[in-house]
Image: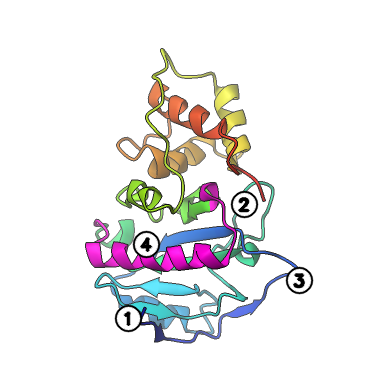
Amino acid sequence: MTIIERPSPNFNARPEGQAVDILLLHYTGMESAEAALARMCDPAAEVSAHYCIDEDGALYRLVPEAARAWHAGRAFWAGASDINGRSIGIELVNPGHAFGYRPFPEPQMARLIALAGEILGRHPIPPARVLGHSDVAPLRKEDPGELFDWPRLAAAGIGLWPDDPAPLAEAPPEAEIHAALARFGYGYLDEDLPAVLRAFQRHFRPAAVTGEADAETGARLLALAGRGDGVGSG
């Protein structure tokens, strides 16, 4: 796999003994790939990622996997708040919701699947811990968003996608939704439950990102939260 080296100064050491157990996907949310790369290499910006994939499939490495890149910001998953310390971050070039959000093209997705497969071969990352930025930072972030093809990744053995669960007659009670989101790994539930539900929907029910715990959202959430395959582990 051809990798273009674009070293960023924006990294530091991972916590001693901390394994990588999260793969975190982002979109750049900027008007061009070069603008995003320049920002991630600017010491004043204090942001970076391990990799960046352009829409044509060009792959850039900014930070070594052994180091802690600065991509998650204020974030939380399954009891952990130093998400940078335990994750590998991949930025996908896309203008994002602010600049004309659009689907992720075939060359970009193909390169992501190839890269992610290699990363999973090097690090024991459970399927349920292949996440989007909005999953770990639902109060601040929307990426990679509702147009990202999570089912395709799961079909390639990367991440988790629910089989169509049996429909519910009605939406579960809020307390049950709250408990299931927490069990799955989400945080910030007491700060803004609708924002967390929107993050869940962007990932697992993108057809309607409403922030409401309707019956379909509830069925998918309860099916996922009830699985014993590493959900929420860390």
What range of the chain is rendered magenta?
102-129
Residue designated by label 2: 76
What SS does tag 1 mark? helix
Question: Callout 1 environment at 10 Å: few (<14), some (14 to 19), or many (20+)?
Answer: few
Residue drawn at 49 percent across, 29 percent down: 223
Front tag of 2 and 4 = 4
Front tag of 1 and 4 = 4
Please tell me which of labels 2 and 4 falls first in the chain. 2
Residue designated by label 3: 16
Is 70 located above or below residue 212 in the figure? below
Q: Quadrant of residue 6?
A: bottom left
Q: CA distance from mark 4 to mark 3?
A: 29 Å
Q: Is residue 178 visible?
A: yes
Identity of the amino acid at label 2? Phe
Residue 111 in percent (x, y) is at 33, 68
Front tag of 4 and 3 = 4
Residue designated by label 1: 34
Q: Is residue 29 visible?
A: no
Instruction: State yes or no: discs 2 and 4 in contact (Cβ < 8 Å).
Output: no
Residue drawn at 44 percent across, 64 percent down: 116
Q: CA distance from mark 2 to mark 1?
A: 29 Å
**Is 170 a magenta residue?**
no
State the mark number for residue 113: 4
Identity of the amino acid at label 3? Glu
What SS does tag 2 mark? loop
**Is 121 a magenta residue?**
yes
Asked whether, in this view, residue 212 is left or right of residue 178, the answer is: left
